[in-house]
Image: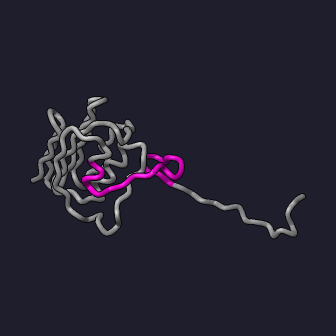
């Protein structure tokens, strides 16, 4: 049994792993159990927002996915670490500090948001040979 508590009413108990993130500025809480789908508040936050984080026995890839759903930036996780189990409690830190502690990085979204995930479609127009270009 895993228990995550990011402060106050922001807590959850799960048979597998869990994670909770509490965002101070909006007084919102997002908790998830491993293998649980959803849990996003629908709001998007920046790296400077102050949060509490509680993670117990959850794979790093699942934690990164939860943070990705909360942030306006894309969260990047090294493929070799996606199954690494995480146990971590942080209080009154920025999203940026929490990501650093987890060894994760972010980048600006590459394309338009589709649902909760970012999808980029690169379609290069075929180039015409220089002797066929319109003048």
Residue 101 forms part of the magenta stretch:
yes
- Asked which quadrant contains residue 26, the reply is top left
| Residue 67 falls left or right of residue 59 | right
Name the residue rendered at 16%, 55% in the picture: 87
Name the residue rendered at 25%, 53% in the picture: 101
Count of residue discs: 0
- Asked which quadrant contains residue 42, the reply is top left
Residue 107 forms part of the magenta stretch:
yes
| Residue 119 falls left or right of residue 78 | right
Q: Residue furthest right?
A: 135
| Residue 76 falls left or right of residue 14 | right
Residue 25 in the image: x percent, y percent?
A: 30, 30
Name the residue rendered at 19%, 50% in the picture: 55
Residue 124 in the image: x percent, y percent?
A: 66, 61
Residue 91 in the image: x percent, y percent?
A: 18, 40
- Magenta residues, as a range? 98-119
Instruction: Please tell me whether residue 3 is drawn above or below residue 82 in the rendered image.
Output: above
Residue 30 in the image: x percent, y percent?
A: 26, 40
Q: Nearer the viewer, residue 107 or 124?
A: 107
């Amino acid at each position: 049994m895993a228990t995550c508590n990011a402060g106050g009413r922001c807590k959850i108990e799960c048979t597998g792993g869990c994670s909770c993130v509490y965002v101070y500025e909006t007084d919102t809480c997002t908790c998830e159990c491993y293998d649980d789908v959803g849990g996003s508040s629908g709001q998007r936050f920046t790296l400077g927002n102050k949060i509490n984080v509680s993670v117990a026995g959850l794979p790093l890839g699942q934690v990164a996915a939860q943070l990705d759903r909360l942030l306006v930036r894309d969260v990047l996780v090294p493929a070799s670490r996606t199954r690494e189990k995480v146990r971590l409690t942080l209080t009154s830190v920025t999203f940026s500090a929490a990501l650093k502690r987890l060894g994760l990085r972010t980048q600006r979204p590459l394309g338009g948001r589709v649902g909760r995930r970012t999808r980029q479609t690169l379609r290069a127009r075929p180039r015409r040979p220089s002797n066929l270009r319109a003048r």
